[in-house]
Amino acid sequence: MESLRCTIMRGGTSKAVFLREEDLPPPGAGRDAICLRVFGSPDRRQIDGLGGADPLTSKMAIIGPPRRPDADVTYTFGQVEIDRPHVDYHSLCGNISAAVGQYAIESGMVAPVEGMTRVRAWTTNLKRMLTIEVPVKNGRPVALGTYRVPGVPGTGAKISIDFSDTAGGATGALLPTGNPVDTLDVPGVGLVEVSLVDIGNAHVFVRARDVGMTGIETPAEIDANKDLLERLERIRAAGAVRMGMASSVEAARSETPATPIIGMISPPASYVGNLDGVPVAAEDVDLVSRLLFMQISHKTYAGTSTVCTGVAARIPGTLVAEAARVEAQGRMELRIGHPAGVIDTESDVVLSGTDRNHGVRRATLGRTARRILDGTVYLDSDE
C-alpha cells in the first residue's frame, strides 16, 4: 500500500486524521503499522507524518458502514501514541465524535435532514451507540454559529453528542465497584479516596487537595511537577486495576495508557484561563477540575470527561457530587471550570438504590467541528 485517502478534521479541542475502513486491512498489526506510518510515530515531533506531536492532535477516526441495523456508521477511535509504536483502542474521544457526525453527512454516508440530522454512530471501542445531532442547512452541515468552545478560536455551529448509551461501556457498569467512593492502597502513595465512574470513558476522580493541589493549577504547573505526575499516574493505574482494566499498577501504562482518565476535582474557585488570560469567576462554575491524559496535563477538558463529570455529579456520595455547588443538584446542567475556561453538560440520572448500574437517560456534550483538509497521505511502502 503506497497511499491512502484521508481527511483531517477538528472536533472540539482535538484534531484527528479520518480514514475509511474499506481502505485499510482488518484490525491487527498490519493496520496499526499503516496508521503509525500515517502519523509519523514513534517520534516526539512526528515530523515524518500527519501527527501534531501532542496527544490532542495524535488521534485517528476510522469510519465504515453500519454493522447494526440501528446504526448509520461504524466508528473506531484510535489514540496514536507519539513516542512508542502503539495505537490505543480502549478509549473514546468525545471531541472527535462531534466531527464524526459532520464527516458522515459530508461524505454521503448519511443523508442530510434539513434543520437537524441525527447520526447514530456505533463505536467499536465501547460497543455502544452515540447519537450525534448536526445542524444542517441546504443539505450541508452548518459551519458558522455562535457556540463557543473554550480552547478553540472563534465560534461555530453547535453539535450535540449524547453519550448515555456508553454507561458501563469499558467496565460493564456505571459504578464499576458499586461504590460512589473507594479507597485505594496505591504503591508509593498510600491510601487515597477515589470515585470510579464509567461513561464516555472510565474515569478515576480524586480530590485535588488529597494530592497536594489547589485545583486551579495551569497545565504547565502540573507538568512541571514530576513528583505530582508520578503520583497521579500511580493513582490512575491503581484505579485501572480496581476496575479490571489493567493486570497490575506497573503494567497499566503499557496496557491502557489513555484510560481510565484521572480527574482532580475541587469546589468552585476563581482563576485565569491559561490559553487566553480571561478570568474565570467562581460564581460562573459549579466545580473545578483538571485532567491528566496520556500522562500529561490536558490543556482544556476532554469531551468524555465532561459527560462523565456531569453524570458523577448526579450520583450522591461521589467526590464529584461532594465538590459541586449545592444549587447544581437541582438542575440538569453542570458548569465545569477547566484550565481554558468553562464547559457545560446536561445529565439525567435515574438512581437505582444499591444497583451499580444507575440509569442514564441523558449525558450530552456540545462541541463544534470543522473539516480542514481532504487529500492523500503517502506511505512510501515497498509492499
Image: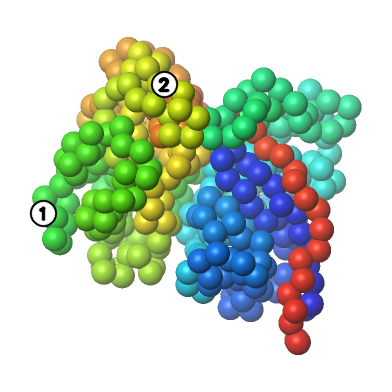
Comes first in the chain, label 1 or label 2:
1
Q: In the image, what residue occupies the spot 62% across and 32% down?
A: 153
Q: Which amino acid does the dot numbered 1 rest on?
A: Gly
Vertical position of residue 149 compared to residue 89: above or below: above
The quadrant of the image that shows the C terminus is bottom right
Residue 197 image offset from top left, x and y in percent: 34, 42
Residue lying at the far left in this picture: please name it: 190
Few, some or many C-alpha atoms within 10 Å of disc 2 (few <14, some 14-19, many ≥20)? few
The amino acid type of the residue labelled 2 equals Pro
Looking at the image, residue 231 lies above or below residue 159: below
Q: Judge whether residue 129 can be spotted in this image.
A: no
Specify the farthest residue to the front. Answer: 277
Q: Quadrant of residue 179?
A: top left
Furthest-bottom residue in view?
Answer: 382
The part of the image, by quadrant, that contains residue 274 is top left
Residue at image position (66%, 61%) is: 50
Protein image colouring: rainbow
Whether residue 138 appears in this view of the structure is yes
Which residue shows up at 40% across the image and 61% down it? 257
Residue 187 in the image: state x and y as whole percent. 15, 61
Residue of label 2: 279
Query: SS for tag 1?
Result: strand
Q: In front: 295, or 73? A: 295
Q: Which residue is mark 1?
A: 190
Q: Are marks 1 and 2 in contact (CB under 8 Å)?
A: no
- Residue at coordinates 81% horizontally, 53% vertically from top-left? 374
What is the x, y in percent for residue 106? 82, 43
Numbered disc total? 2
SS label for mark 2: strand
Question: On the picture, is 66 further left or further right than 268?
Answer: right
Quarter holding the N terminus? bottom right
Left or right position of 207 against 148: left
